[in-house]
Amino acid sequence: MESYIYTNNGVETSNAIVEAPPHFNAHVLIAEDSRLCAWVLSTHFRSLGYRVTTVRDGLALLEAAGSSSNSPDIIIVDYHMPVMDGEETVKKLKADPVTRHLPVLVLTGDLAAESLEKLIAAGADAYVEKNDGLSILQEKVSQFI
């Protein structure tokens, strides 16, 4: 049962017990070469209670995902990155027995049907178009956690 406290200045507070969402403290590993996009993504997911690790390319993502001490619950990878792109990164993640079980979402601005088919064929569990926004990305993440 909730009870509300009203203070003299009109600020309402509640002492209700609120359960943590099911994804609370889940670990999201993000590979994004754009510093601005990485910042937006990490800020968004942290504000929802996720633990977030960001890296700048696919090779760094493979190293981070394979670390048993900090294994992610879900991976978000940009399609176009330096060093190793999203397609190659997904292929390597899904070929490795340590990481093949991890859900992988590809974030892309590349809307060509052929490119999207390549991502799914590589093993991506889903893709989200960058233009779709954070709410669509969050819905996809919630489906896998």
Image (spheres, rainbow, N blue to C red):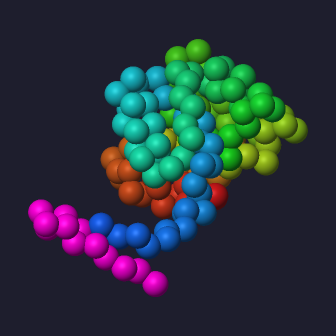
Residues in magenta? Answer: 1-12
Q: Assess whether residue 5 is covered by the magenta stretch.
A: yes
| Above or below 137: residue 90 | above
Q: Residue at x 30, y 67 (%)?
A: 13
Asked if residue 109 can be seen in this view, the reply is no
Relative to 94, residue 65 above or below = above
Q: Tell whether 47 sits left or right of 85.
A: left
List x then y, in percent, for residue 109.
40, 39
Foreground pick, 70 / 91: 70
Residue furthest right as drawn: 97
Q: Nearer the viewer, residue 116 or 89?
A: 89
Give the residue furthest to the front.
Answer: 8
Q: Is residue 29 left or right of residue 44?
A: right
Question: Which residue appears at 48% of the width and 61% of the height?
Answer: 139
Instruction: Give the side of residue 102 with respect to residue 105, left or right.
Output: right
Q: Observer-nearest residue: 100 or 120?
A: 100
Q: On the rendered image, what quadrant is the C terminus found in? A: bottom right
Q: Is residue 69 visible?
A: yes
Q: Chief secondary structure of the magenta span?
A: loop
**Viewer-nearest residue: 70 or 94:** 70
Q: How many marks?
A: 0
Q: Position of residue 33 (x, y in %)?
A: 46, 23
